[in-house]
Every structure is written in C-alpha cells, then in structure tokens.
Amino acid sequence: MPKNPQPDRKPLDPTDLALVRLLEQDGRMSNAMLAREVGIAESTCLVRVRSLRDRGVIRGIHADIDPVAVGRPVEAMIAVRFGGHRRSHFEQFTEEVPRLPGVLGAFHVSGAIDYYVHVATESADALRDFVLDHLTNRPGVLHAETSLIFESLRGRGTMTRTGDAPEQPA
C-alpha cells in the first residue's frame, strides 16, 4: 500500500468519489445499498470498490472503539525524538511501534520531534511502563515526552469535498 499518493494514480471519477463519500459516512453500508445510492449495478459497484481498495484509495474499514469501554482510560500523546537519525532505527520503529498493544496511531512528523505516538493504557503505571519498555529503550531514541490527553475529539470531517459527488436522484 503506498504511503503517499502516486503521481500516476488514476484520478477518481464522480462515481468513485460518490462511493468513497458513502463509505466514509458508513463503512458498513452493503454493496446493494451503495449501488442503489450511486445508481449503478451491484456487480459494477463491487468491481469499483475492489478497485478503490486495490489502488490504495480505501485503506481499510475500521471500528471506532472507545478506549474507556475496553479498559484503557488513560490516553497520551508521546513525543519521541531520535539522536543520530539512522535509517535502520526509523525503519525498526516504523515497523514495530504501530503494532504494540494500546497504540492508536504513530505519526512521523517534521520539526524537533520525530514521532508522535498516541496510546491508550489501563493506568498511569501502565503508561509509564509502556514508555520505558517500548520507547525509551529503543535504539536511537534520545528522548520521549508524554502528554496526557484529557479529552479526545474524533474528527468528523470528510476527505471528499462537497460537490465531488454527482447529484443523488430525488
């Protein structure tokens, strides 16, 4: 799956954009409902959605789980700074950290910080242990600074622009 858009990637047509918009609103929408909403045959819809996945436009459909409900009420953003900036350290970090239990996201950024790691843990003690066991002892990591998250607001904006999708039949 490509990390960044490819310049030779086929542009999305209005039907593709309509499918993306609908799946963005409800990722569990059935193929039959998608086809009906967009005004195409179910078989065509299935092929188009599969193509959107294969091209990396749709990267996945995920459940939005409340960390508190599953026993992980302590959320934090951990700023990680590397020393030396060896490619192997970044590659190992990129490969391993997103797979650790409790990691909600990892972001490679520009500036003084190299990565932000968003985590949810069972307690403050578990958060401390996570930082010590999984971040500060990694090769190349120079510093990790933890900021507790008091409130997490999930974005509800859309990736598609208004007007990207064709008019829906009345």
Image (tube, rainbow, N blue to C red):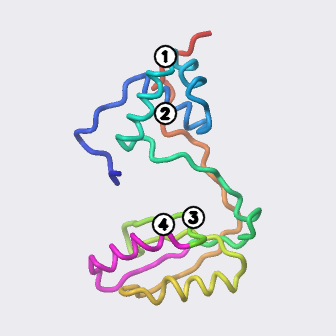
The answer to which of marks 3 and 2 sits earlier in the sequence is 2
Residue 104 tag number: 3
Q: Which mark is residue 24?
A: none
Residue 20 image label: 2
Q: CA distance from mark 2 to mark 1?
A: 16 Å
Q: CA distance from mark 4 to mark 3?
A: 7 Å
Quadrant where the C terminus sits is: top right
Reading the chain from its start, which is encountered first: label 2 or label 1?
2
Q: Quadrant of residue 101?
A: bottom right
Q: CA distance from mark 3 to mark 1?
A: 37 Å
> Of label 2 and label 4, which has the lower sequence position?
2
Place of residue 20 in the rendered image (x, y in percent of width and height, measured from the top left): 49, 33
Q: Position of residue 44 (x, y in %)?
A: 44, 21
> Which sits earlier in the primary sequence, circle 1 or circle 4?
1
Q: Is residue 10 left or right of residue 149?
A: left
Pair 3/1: label in front: 1
Range shown magenta: 78-100
Q: Is 116 colored magenta in this rendering?
A: no
Element under disc 4: strand
> Given the image, on which type of amino acid does mark 3 rest?
Leu
Considering only vertical position in the picture, is 1 above or below 133? Answer: above
User: What kind of element bears circle 1?
Assistant: loop
Task: Give the class, few, some or many, for how many residues have Cα within 10 Å of label 2's Cα (few <14, many ≥20).
Answer: many
Measure the alpha-carbon separation of dots 3 and 2: 23 Å
Residue type at mark 4?
A: Ala
Residue bearing the label numbered 1: 41
- Residue receiving disc 4: 106
Is residue 143 placed above or below 29 in the rendered structure? below
